[in-house]
Amino acid sequence: MPRNVCRCEEFSCSASDLLAVLTSTELLQEQQRLQGARNVSVALVTRDDRRWVIEVRALERMRNLVSFQPGSGSPSVITYDWDLEKLGCTWAYQGPHGSRLQLAGSLHIEPLARGARLQSMFDVKVNVPLMAAPAERVVEAFLVASYPGFIAAVRRRIEETVQQAE
């Protein structure tokens, strides 16, 4: 049974500033490095007035579906598909486990009177007989544990953006 997680955070910047930070090459690279990836590259695949598609490629720590193993790294790709009018995106992970691990989610930015709220959702599904539930819990725990680091990185980038604007 897939595992679903939802988190919300509020930021003291405009929705457009939050969007700029979330789509910045620097944040996307930092997010992957926080999770142990290396050789991270970011490419803007599609860009028009309404939609951006961003691919983040990396070599990540070798993972089996129940633990992490040291090694030379495995290639992975995360594709973010941003709808700029709706201030939201869907994302999907593709890694060395192929269809055995399905990891996808969404980000949505909501403008507030004084700032913006980010809603992050993700779904984990493992397709391995007899191992699915324990493996899903391991992947979910890893992602939940890395979430505060991601939020801290977003806050740092927002502060840097505000300081540069002054």
Image (cartoon, rainbow, N blue to C red):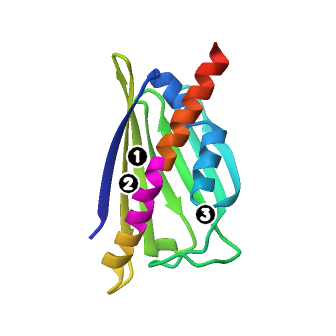
Q: Which amino acid does label 3 sit on?
A: Ser
Q: Kindly state the secondary structure of the residue where label 2 is placed.
A: strand
Q: What residue type is labelled 1?
A: Ser
Q: x, y percentage for residue 32?
A: 60, 54
| Mark seen at residue 76 | 3
Q: Distance between the residues labelled 3 and 2?
A: 17 Å
Q: Distance between the residues labelled 1 and 3?
A: 18 Å
Q: Which of 48 and 70 is in front in this view?
A: 70
> Would you say the residues marked 2 and 1 are in contact, meaning their CB atoms lie under 8 Å apart?
yes
Q: Does the magenta stretch include residue 43?
A: no
Of helix, strand and loop, which one carries label 1? Answer: strand
Find the distance from the CA under tag 2 to the CA under tag 1. 6 Å
The answer to whether residue 126 is visible is: no
Q: How crowded is mark 2: few (under 14 residues within 10 Å), some or many (20 or more)?
A: many
- Badge 3 marks a residue whose secondary structure is strand
Residue placed at 42% from the left, 67% from the top? Answer: 139
Residue ID for mark 2: 122
| Residue 140 visible in rendering | yes
* Residue range highlighted in magenta: 139-148
- Pointer 1 and pointer 3: residues touching (CB < 8 Å)? no
Task: Report crowding for label 1: few under 14, some 14 to 19, many 20 or more residues within 10 A (C-alpha).
Answer: some
- Which residue position is annotated with label 1? 106
Are the residues tagged 3 and 2 within 8 Å (C-beta)?
no
